[in-house]
Image (cartoon, helix red, strand yellow):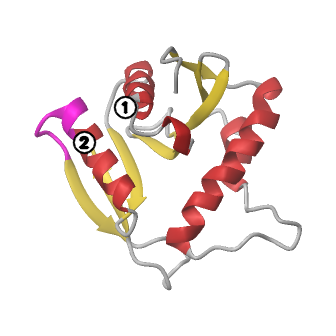
């Protein structure tokens, strides 16, 4: 990745086609850890993507590097006591470059207060990334716990980090 100018912008309706394509990549990545297959038309479920634009308690962000879309961050719980980074994605070509950490820091900075993020224990990249993010943002003031996935008793519990 040659351009390291990372920008986080609140996404608008005009950004939706880009986010739709990034969402498909995100769901494809997660399918390895969740065992989820695409629907017959080749698409994945997109309720969280839809909600990110429809619910006033949420904020969708688009992450770019130069002119390239490289990821997104969807926040929920803006009106509640705890914000949740309920969907976060960086394309493979931009991973391990600092883009993800910079994006998370900016999102957290825009919405001060307690935060939570969930990931899968069998996703080693996510485990390393989110533990590093928690330590960088909160020092030793973060916790980790396992919680069942609602409506999915067939899946291993998600790991939740709070800071």
Determine crowd level at label 2: few under 14, some 14-19, many 20+ residues with C-alpha closer than 10 A: some
Q: Residue at x 33, y 62 (%)?
A: 159
Q: Residue at x 10, y 40 (%)?
A: 140
**135 sits left or right of 87 in the view:** left
Q: Which mark is residue 101?
A: 1
Say which label, 2 or 1, has the lower sequence index. 1
Please name whichever residue, 5 or 44, is drawn nearer the observer in this view of the structure: 5
Determine crowd level at label 1: few under 14, some 14-19, many 20+ residues with C-alpha closer than 10 A: some
Which residue does the numbered mark 2 point to in the structure image? 132
Q: Quadrant of residue 64?
A: top right
Q: Secondary structure at mark 2?
A: helix
Q: Residue at x 49, y 40 (%)?
A: 77
Q: CA distance from mark 2 to mark 1?
A: 9 Å
Q: Give the residue at the far right of this rendering.
A: 41
Residue 139: say if magenta: yes
- Residue 25 in percent (x, y) is at 66, 51
Are the residues tagged 2 and 1 within 8 Å (C-beta)? yes
**105 sits left or right of 39 in the view:** left
Q: Give the residue at the far bottom of this rendering.
A: 154
Report the magenta residues as a range: 135-142
Q: Quadrant of residue 104?
A: top left
- Residue 93 in percent (x, y) is at 54, 39
The answer, for residue 59, to whether it is visible in the render is no
- Residue 37 in percent (x, y) is at 70, 74
Please name whichever residue, 57 or 134, is drawn nearer the observer in this view of the structure: 134
Looking at the image, residue 130 lies above or below residue 64 = below
**126 sits left or right of 35 in the view:** left
- Please identify the quadrant where the C terminus is shown: top left
């Amino acid at each position: 990745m040659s351009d390291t100018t990372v920008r986080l912008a609140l996404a608008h309706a005009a950004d939706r086609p880009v986010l739709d394509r990034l969402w498909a990549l995100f769901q494809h990545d997660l399918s390895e850890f969740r065992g989820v297959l695409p629907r017959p038309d080749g698409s994945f479920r997109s309720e969280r993507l839809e909600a990110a634009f429809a619910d006033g308690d949420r904020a969708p962000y688009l992450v770019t590097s130069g002119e390239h879309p490289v990821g997104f961050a969807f926040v929920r719980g803006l009106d509640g006591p705890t914000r949740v980074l309920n969907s976060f994605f960086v394309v493979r070509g931009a991973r391990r470059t600092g883009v993800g950490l910079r994006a998370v820091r900016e999102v957290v900075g825009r919405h001060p207060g307690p935060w939570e993020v969930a990931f899968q224990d069998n996703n080693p990249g996510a485990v390393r990334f989110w533990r590093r993010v928690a330590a960088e943002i909160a020092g030793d003031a973060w916790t980790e716990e396992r919680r069942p996935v609602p409506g999915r008793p067939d899946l291993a519990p998600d790991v939740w980090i709070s800071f």
